[in-house]
Image: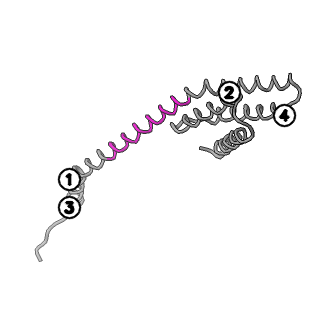
Amino acid sequence: MGKAAILTGFYIVSTVLALLAGQPATTYLEKKVREAYLNLAKAEEKGANVSEAALKLNKALQLLRLAKHEENPEKREEMLKEAEKLILEVEKLTPKLAREGEVKETIRKITSAFTAVAASAALVLAYLYLPRLLWRLWVKARSNWRVVKT
């Protein structure tokens, strides 16, 4: 995971906490943001790359924060609609990301198991055939030697 994803995660957490500390979470969009964030965190735990979705959720949080302080009702409504659109996009992406994370985790487990089996097989083959090979090479290398009685 890169520095940008970590920083984005910290920013999202701090923004969610700021939203929760400022007012009780009664608005529909704030609840949706929290749900989307929790689902995104679960997808990340499964191994998914959530950086794109985190950036969209971050943008939605910024729009919500700006909309709270906007006095023009039309502009405020536009910001809320854009934030809702971004939140819905993140909600649509989250199950797909979770599945991708599960697939990556399964592939990682299979690869680890295959690597362990291959290493074990290599060790068994080396144990069985390496002594014979070394003796053959030793005899071949010394085949021209003559034994002399001293």
| Residue 112 sits inside the magenta stretch | yes
Earlier residue among tags 2 and 4 = 4
Quadrant location of the C terminus in the rendered image: bottom left
Task: Report how far apart the C-alphas of labels 1 and 2 lie in the structure.
Answer: 67 Å
Q: What percent of the width, then of the height, locates residue 49?
A: 58, 36
Q: Is residue 20 left or right of residue 134?
A: right
Amino acid at dot 3: Asn
Res 87 label: 2
Amino acid at dot 4: His
In depth, the one of 121 and 107 nearer the eye is 107
Callout 1 crowding tier (Cα within 10 Å): few <14, some 14–19, many ≥20 = few
Earlier residue among tags 1 and 4 = 4
Q: Secondary structure at mark 3?
A: loop
Task: Report how far apart the C-alphas of labels 4 and 3 lie in the structure.
Answer: 95 Å
Q: What percent of the width, then of the height, locates residue 2?
A: 62, 44
In depth, the one of 137 and 63 nearer the eye is 63
Q: Is residue 101 left or right of residue 65?
A: left
